[in-house]
C-alpha cells in the first residue's frame, strides 16, 4: 500500500495534506524518514510514525446508523443527501457503503462498512438473513394477515414471498406490528401489506441478522460496532 493512502485512511488528512506531512519530514517508516508519497509499505509489518506517534492502520470500518427519513441509502447522489454524507471525514475516507437499502422514508438500522465480503454474506439470498421491521399500518391487522404472511403473499408483480413472521403489537383503526422477513425485494414490506389491502404509514428496521438497533442512537447518529456485535455478524450462521 502507498504511504499516502495509508496515512489518508488513518485520519491524517487528504492526500494533499499527507504530502505536506511527508515533505516536512514528519513521517518515518521503520525509523527512516520517508518523503516519497508513492513509497509502498506493509501496514502489518512496517512501523510507521507521524511526528513520532505510531500509526494504527485499519482496513475495515463497521458502523451502525439509525437512518433518518429523507436520506438516501446510497454512497452519492447529485441532488439528495445520502447516509454517507452524514459521516465524519474520519469514516467517509474509508469509502464505506450501506449494506442493503432502506427506502428514503424508512428509518432505523443500517449497517455501513467497506467490508465487501461481510456485505455479500449478509445480503446473499442463500443465507436467509432475517430482517425485522416495526411498522404502523393504516387499518386493523388481523390473525388472518399473520397466517397469510406465514404462507407467503403474492406481490403486485406476481412474486410469491417467502414465509414471514408477523407479530401484532396493537390492533385497531391503526395497528402496530413487527414483521420479520428473510429476503429483500424492492419495497417489500410495503408491498406485502398492499397485497392484503393495507398500507404502511411508518416503517423502521430494528434488526438485521444478529445486529439490533441501539435505541440510544438518535436519528442520524451512528457508532462503531462493538467487538461482540461484529463477531456475531461475521459468524455467518444460517438462521433457516
Image: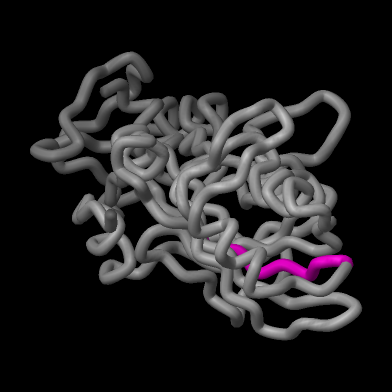
Residue drawn at x 20%, y 26% is 41
Q: Position of residue 62 (x, y in %)?
A: 41, 53
Q: Is 59 located above or below residue 174 in the figure?
A: above
Q: Main secondary structure of the magenta part?
A: strand
Q: Residue at x 67, y 37 (%)?
A: 155
In the figure, residue 4 lies in which quadrant? top left
Q: Please state, as top left, top right, bottom left or bottom right, where the N terminus lies in the image.
A: top left
Percent x, y for residue 106? 74, 54
Tally of numbered discs: 0
Residue 93 seen anywhere in this rendered image of the structure:
no
Q: Which residues are magenta?
A: 132-138
Instruction: Tell me which colouring the rendered structure shows.
Output: one colour
120 lies above or below 19: below
Left or right: residue 208 versus residue 68 is: left
- Decide: is 46 above or below 182: above
Left or right, residue 113 beside residue 75: left
Amino acid at each position: 500500500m502507498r504511504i499516502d493512502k495509508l496515512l489518508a485512511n488513518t485520519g491524517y488528512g487528504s492526500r494533499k495534506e499527507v504530502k505536506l506531512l511527508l515533505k516536512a519530514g514528519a513521517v518515518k517508516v521503520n525509523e527512516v524518514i520517508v518523503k516519497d508519497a508513492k513509497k509502498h509499505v506493509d501496514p502489518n509489518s512496517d512501523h510507521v510514525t507521524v511526528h513520532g506517534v505510531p500509526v494504527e492502520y485499519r482496513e475495515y470500518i463497521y458502523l451502525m446508523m439509525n437512518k433518518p427519513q429523507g436520506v438516501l441509502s446510497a454512497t452519492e447522489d447529485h441532488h439528495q443527501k445520502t447516509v454517507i454524507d452524514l459521516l465524519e471525514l474520519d469514516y467517509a475516507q474509508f469509502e464505506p457503503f450501506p449494506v442493503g437499502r432502506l427506502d428514503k422514508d424508512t428509518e432505523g438500522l443500517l449497517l455501513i462498512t467497506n467490508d465487501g465480503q461481510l456485505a455479500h454474506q449478509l445480503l446473499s439470498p442463500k443465507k436467509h438473513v432475517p430482517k425485522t421491521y416495526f411498522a404502523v399500518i393504516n387499518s386493523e391487522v388481523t390473525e388472518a394477515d399473520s397466517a397469510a404472511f406465514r404462507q407467503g403473499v403474492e406481490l403486485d408483480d406476481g412474486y410469491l414471498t417467502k414465509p414471514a413472521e408477523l407479530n401484532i403489537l396493537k390492533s385497531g383503526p391503526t395497528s402496530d406490528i413487527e414483521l420479520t422477513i428473510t429476503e429483500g425485494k424492492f419495497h417489500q414490506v410495503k408491498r406485502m401489506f398492499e397485497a392484503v389491502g393495507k398500507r404502511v404509514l411508518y416503517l423502521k428496521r430494528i434488526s438485521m441478522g444478529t445486529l439490533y438497533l441501539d435505541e440510544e442512537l438518535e436519528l442520524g447518529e451512528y457508532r462503531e460496532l462493538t467487538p461482540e456485535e461484529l463477531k456475531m455478524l461475521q459468524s455467518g450462521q444460517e438462521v433457516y
